[in-house]
């Protein structure tokens, strides 16, 4: 029986996946309240969930949304598409789940879980590539899985860019050892996924530092890598041409977005304040996440007070620190130094207030003018590299124990390290019982390892490490759940805060460029009361010039719903203006009820209307104006005005009219759908290469 169990659990190729699934199931159990809907995602994760659901909802209906009519009365949607990376093939998972009846919130959470598992899988493969032994790879996987990354996906959005980044480095490492199509295509797909977001600059910075240090530490290997790489490209010319075409195509959305960001059609006033670049997505130096990683206080509860841990706080299982402490007497190899220098280099950038590196880079390297949340480098690279460094030190420690004949001395030393760490923890307040249990289990592991003369089985070692990590992490996450339950279900606090903010000016992170101007002059309640009427018919249209007197007049007109609309004097002529003293005092603010107008159809990018008028009138649609909108009446294109500073307006003739308003051009939609098809096809091609790669390797 024992031999059968040993054979079952030591079959590397067949049952490796089982050891990845077991910790992941435990992780899902720790965050079960999110997946069951008892707790809600937080902060930026909410916004990204809404945007991804909006995108997938429209895509499932055959609509590619380039406009969001609900975002502050309408705004170009390309900014949000670039944030989520609209060509990501994994979004089809959400669409598929919705099609079979899964609620949107649940579908998105399943997507998050799958994506996080993919991140952990890539991290496992990278560790196994570098450290060879699967035990260390599993240890790294468990430490990563139950680190604060586990809660970060419910608090932030960076998992969306982290997954392609970490898979890129796995494919890069695999390609460096054995240049194969599957590795090269994997790298290209990952780069494409990152480039289609509006912030590929984190990846570029991490890659630049990694490449520089790789050349510095592994010069000879680097030369061999380039030789094999060039030989591969020469041998696979058609395949290389396709990859180049794919990469160039993936740059198109970013180039279009960057061009639009300089047009003034949309604005990010808070983010852009103080920037010295005309692009709306550029960031002022003083607005770089209000400081750096230290100023945010993420490290405040790394060793104590886990009972009050919050979303975003940095947490690592204590076995991470115990291994680093015990490994101080072990040999430090080149890999450890390489990882350490990567972490230190990124630290110099993220500590913006204490080091001058970031200011220098901001002033001299253009990509840093677009990086706002500079501390994301910690999540995207420093934390994974730190875990990998710890496990590399763990391997070095166990190797030193294996090669030593002084087992008793090592046992005393290991016990001493655990006692030192325990004394260190005792000086902190609020240490949970799970932390002490983790220290004890860690000590048990080392005692068994030394006592059994290094013959502890993989199965036993795996479950002891998992037990040490899970025992502590489950209690920490339970404390986090308790705190979230208290915060999210305190309706009184939320309602009071909401009431205090009603009369304040609308705070805009992102909006149409003209609307961002309008909110600075028109009182919030007046603007909301006016814009709640989607369609308004006017008889009088007057020109205006931008000045404070005009905005006072506009505020009065909006408040009283006077029968008077305004168009810019510089964008119209006398033939577009009309003023008659014999018209009604007030505008028609409900033409649907009066039978003048009916909405035939609408989606994110289109309005199809039908009107029946006794005389020509000016229709204002309180959906923000953008130069990419086009208007057609009875099949003929007509001029679309920027009315009342920020909204759409057009003259509608008497009689019955069919009106169509469409955002952007058919060519743009064809391009976007073609890119989605390109990325989906490339992903399927990659899967085909992955599935066929083991058979090719076995036959060779």
Image (cartoon, helix red, strand yellow):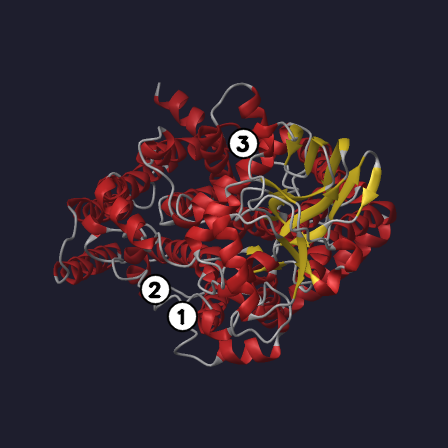
- The answer to whether residue 493 is left or right of residue 503 is left
Label 1 crowd (10 A; few <14 / some 14-19 / many >=20)? many
Label 3 crowd (10 A; few <14 / some 14-19 / many >=20)? few
Residue tagged by mark 1? Answer: 291
- Label 1 – label 2 distance at C-alpha: 7 Å
- Label 1 – label 3 distance at C-alpha: 47 Å
Q: x%, y% of residue 465?
A: 31, 42
Q: x%, y% of residue 333?
A: 46, 65
* Residue 13: assigned label: 3
Quarter of the image with the C terminus in it: top right
Q: Earlier in the sequence, mark 1 or mark 3?
A: 3
Query: Which residue is more in the foreground, 691 or 250?
Result: 250
Task: Kindly indicate whether the residue at mark 3 contacts the one at mark 2 (C-beta within 8 angstroms).
Answer: no
Q: Which quadrant of the view contains residue 418?
A: bottom left
Q: Earlier in the sequence, mark 2 or mark 3?
A: 3
Task: Kindly indicate whether the residue at mark 2 contacts the one at mark 1 (C-beta within 8 angstroms).
Answer: yes
- The answer to whether residue 98 is left or right of residue 389 is right
Q: Secondary structure at mark 2?
A: loop
- Label 2 – label 3 distance at C-alpha: 43 Å
Q: x%, y% of residue 188?
A: 70, 49
Query: Which residue is more in the foreground, 411 or 505?
Result: 505
Which of the two marks, 1 or 3, is nearer to us in this view? Answer: 1
* Residue 296: assigned label: 2
Q: Using the rendered image of the protein, determine whether residue 150 is visible from the camera's viewpoint.
A: yes
Q: Which quadrant of the view contains residue 616?
A: top right
Q: Secondary structure at mark 3?
A: helix
Which of the two marks, 2 or 3, is nearer to us in this view? Answer: 2
Residue found 53% across the figure and 36% down from its top: 53
Image: 293 above or below 20 = below
Query: Which residue is more in the foreground, 318 or 335?
Result: 318
Label 2 crowd (10 A; few <14 / some 14-19 / many >=20)? some
Image: 123 above or below 201 = above
């Amino acid at each position: 029986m024992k031999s059968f169990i040993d054979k079952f659990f030591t079959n590397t190729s067949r049952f490796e996946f089982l050891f990845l699934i077991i910790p992941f199931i435990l992780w899902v159990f720790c965050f079960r309240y999110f997946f069951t809907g008892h707790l809600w995602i937080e902060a930026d994760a909410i916004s990204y969930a809404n945007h991804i659901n909006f995108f997938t909802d429209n895509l499932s209906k055959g609509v590619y949304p380039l406009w969001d009519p609900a975002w502050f009365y309408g705004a170009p949607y390309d900014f949000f598409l670039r944030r989520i990376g609209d060509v990501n093939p994994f979004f089809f998972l959400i669409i598929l789940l919705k099609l079979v009846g899964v609620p949107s919130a649940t579908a998105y959470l399943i997507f998050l879980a799958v994506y996080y598992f993919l991140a952990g899988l890539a991290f496992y493969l990278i560790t196994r590539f570098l450290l060879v032994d699967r035990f260390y790879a599993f240890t790294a996987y468990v430490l990563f899985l139950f680190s604060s990354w586990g809660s970060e996906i419910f608090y932030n959005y960076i998992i969306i860019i982290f997954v392609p980044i970490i898979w890129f480095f796995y494919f890069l490492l695999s390609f460096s050892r054995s240049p194969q199509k599957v590795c090269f295509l994997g790298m290209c797909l990952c780069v494409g996924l990152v480039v289609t977001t509006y912030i590929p600059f984190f990846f570029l910075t991490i890659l630049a530092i990694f490449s520089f240090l790789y050349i510095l530490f592994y010069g000879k290997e680097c030369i061999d890598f380039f030789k094999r790489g060039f030989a591969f490209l020469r041998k696979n010319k058609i395949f290389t041409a396709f990859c180049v075409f794919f990469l160039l195509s993936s740059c198109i959305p970013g180039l279009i977005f960057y061009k639009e960001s300089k047009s003034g059609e949309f604005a990010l006033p808070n983010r852009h304040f103080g920037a010295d670049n005309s692009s709306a997505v550029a960031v002022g130096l003083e607005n770089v996440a209000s400081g750096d990683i230290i100023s945010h206080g993420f490290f405040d509860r790394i060793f104590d007070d886990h009972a009050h841990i919050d979303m975003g706080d940095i947490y690592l299982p204590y076995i991470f620190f115990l291994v680093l402490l015990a490994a101080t007497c072990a040999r430090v190899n080149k890999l450890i130094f390489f990882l350490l220098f990567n972490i230190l280099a990124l630290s110099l950038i993220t500590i913006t207030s204490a080091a001058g590196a970031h200011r220098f880079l901001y002033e001299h390297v253009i990509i840093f003018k677009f990086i706002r949340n500079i501390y994301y480098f910690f999540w995207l690279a420093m934390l994974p590299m730190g875990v990998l460094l710890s496990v590399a030190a763990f391997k070095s420690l166990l190797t030193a124990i294996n090669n030593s004949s002084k087992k008793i001395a090592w046992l005393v030393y290991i016990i001493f390290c655990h006692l030192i760490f325990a004394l260190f923890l005792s000086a902190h307040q609020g240490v949970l019982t799970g932390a002490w249990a983790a220290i004890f289990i860690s000590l048990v592991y080392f005692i068994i390892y030394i006592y059994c003369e290094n013959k502890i089985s993989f199965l036993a070692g795996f479950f002891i490490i998992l037990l040490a990590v899970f025992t502590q992490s489950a209690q920490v996450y339970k404390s986090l759940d308790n705190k979230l339950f208290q915060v999210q279900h305190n309706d009184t606090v939320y309602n009071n805060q909401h009431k205090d903010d009603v009369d304040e000016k609308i705070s805009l992170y992102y909006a149409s460029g003209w609307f961002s101007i309008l909110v600075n002059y028109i009182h919030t309640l007046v603007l909301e009361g006016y814009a709640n009427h989607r369609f308004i018919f006017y008889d009088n249209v007057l020109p205006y010039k931008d000045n404070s007197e005009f905005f006072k007049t506009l505020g009065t007109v909006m408040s009283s719903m006077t029968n008077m609309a305004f168009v810019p004097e510089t964008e119209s002529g006398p033939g577009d203006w009309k003023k008659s003293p014999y018209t009604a005092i007030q505008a028609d603010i409900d033409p649907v009820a009066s039978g003048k107008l009916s909405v035939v159809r609408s989606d994110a990018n289109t309005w199809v209307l039908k009107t029946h008028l006794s005389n020509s009138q000016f229709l204002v649609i309180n959906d923000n104006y953008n130069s990419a909108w086009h208007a057609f009446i009875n099949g003929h294109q007509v001029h679309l005005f920027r009315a009342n500073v920020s909204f759409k307006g057009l003259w509608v003739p008497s009689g019955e009219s069919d009106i169509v308003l469409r955002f952007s051009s058919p060519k743009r939609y064809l391009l976007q759908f073609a890119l989605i098809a390109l990325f989906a096809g490339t992903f399927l091609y990659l899967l085909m290469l992955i599935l066929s790669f083991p058979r090719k390797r076995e036959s060779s």
